Image (cartoon, rainbow, N blue to C red):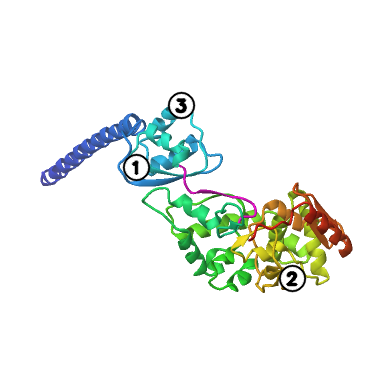
Amino acid sequence: MATQRSMQPKLRRRRQWTGALAIALVILLIGSIGYVWYQRNVVAIRDYEGDGNGKIVMVRVDAGDSVSSLAPQLVEKGVVGSRRALMSAAEKEEPSLQQGYYPLQEEMSADKALKILTDDESRRGVVDIPNGLTLDDLTVVGGEPRPGIYTLVSQQTCQDETTCVTPQQLKDAVAQTSAEELGLPDWAREAVDSRGADPRKLEGLIAPGVHLFDPTAEPLAIAQDLIHDSVDSFEGTGLVDSANRVGLTPYELLTAASLVEREAPEGDFDKVARVILNRLEINQKLEFDSTVNYSISEQEVATTSADRARETPWNTYAKEGLPATPIASPGLKAVHAMENPAEGDWLYFVTVDLDGRTVFNREFSDHEAAISESLDNGVLDSNRE
């Protein structure tokens, strides 16, 4: 009897625990069903209203991106309420996306988000650098000023009042940062660091073409993004191996390619490349007017005797060998020309008419005759006062 009485409290506690567990399981089941219902019927189709809550979210669109591929990012960052809402809006709009950065906001309606993502006026952080452009702005004698790379990049950051990186801030960031920290490869570091705090020490190392960068980033981060893209572009040509094959360092090859870019029409790039290599081989000065112009505030094709006599790190009339740095950003065709120069024994060339026809010669007497033709055709006329 004593044993039966002692077991009764245990049985009651077990029944109570079993009952509590059953209730908990019922609550958990109801909660799970409610959660699933909420996710399927609220979260999965949720769409915010209006233009957003004011918190800016920069969204990057790369070439080939679609609304579908961007949807996870937009939902995760809280820009739109759900993938389904975004895709439903896309079915109505049939959007066409262009690469760039777009300033969206948290909690936007899917329609509003798509409107900004397809608005060219909203696109930022995209700079298209032409072949042969310099870092600094360029003034042409008798012509219009040409904005340089620093200015073009700055313009992409200054489209509203929230952020604006000036050209000078970009220059300061470059000038105060080592080549290694900038992200330059080993083959460029010594030459770049030798320029000290010169903001033009990156000349020629920002590749022409389209670059994407976060326009709200710090100046140094912007420069690092541009360099990263550019190094990939240049090294993708086989630059390192090709430079060794033609007897130059990779940095020297880019320097030579910048001369090719500035000196001749595209169809003659490989011939100009051969002239450069032929002259370097026999230690003959290059004497390129483009290298004279690099350190002149106002430039034109013709240079003066005084200009050519000035001793600068770039003037190849006054110094032997290549300029100390590239004199512009060489396009890939100019780089390819230096990697694969034409066969020939030429030492001289000059453009002889306004259509860009260029004559190549081995003998200086033949070159003088070509110069006379160029003068007669007004190619070397000067607009200097």
Q: Provide residue 267's location: percent of width, then percent of height.
A: 77, 48
Question: Is residue 368 visible to us here?
Answer: yes
Q: Dot 2 corresponds to which residue?
A: 321
Residue 141 got which mark?
none
Q: Is residue 37 left or right of residue 227?
A: left
Q: Dot 1 corresponds to which residue?
A: 106
State the quadrant of the C terminus: bottom right
At 78% from the left and 56% from the top, the residue drawn is 375
Q: Provide residue 124's location: percent of width, then percent of height.
A: 47, 46
Q: Is residue 266 left or right of residue 127?
A: right
State the quadrant of the N terminus: top left
Residue 186 to residue 126: above or below: below
Which of the two residues, 38 or 87, is positioned nearer the viewer here? 87
CA neighbours of label 3 inside 10 A, class few (<14), some (14 to 19), many (20+) = few
Q: Identity of the amino acid at label 3?
A: Glu
Main SS of the magenta part reads loop
Residue 63 to residue 274: above or below: above
Pick whichever of labels 1 and 3 is earlier in the sequence. Answer: 3
Q: Residue furthest top?
A: 92
Q: Identity of the amino acid at label 1?
A: Glu
Q: In which quadrant of the rendered view does residue 110 lie? A: top left
Q: Identity of the amino acid at label 2?
A: Gly
Q: Residue furthest front?
A: 385
At 47% from the left and 51% from the top, the residue drawn is 155
Alpha-carbon span between mark 1 and mark 3: 22 Å
Question: Is residue 346 visible to us here?
Answer: no
Alpha-carbon span between mark 2 and mark 3: 61 Å
Q: Dot 3 corresponds to which residue?
A: 91
Which of the two residues, 298 or 197, is positioned nearer the viewer here? 298
Alpha-carbon span between mark 2 and mark 1: 57 Å
Which range of residues does the magenta coloring cover? 123-133
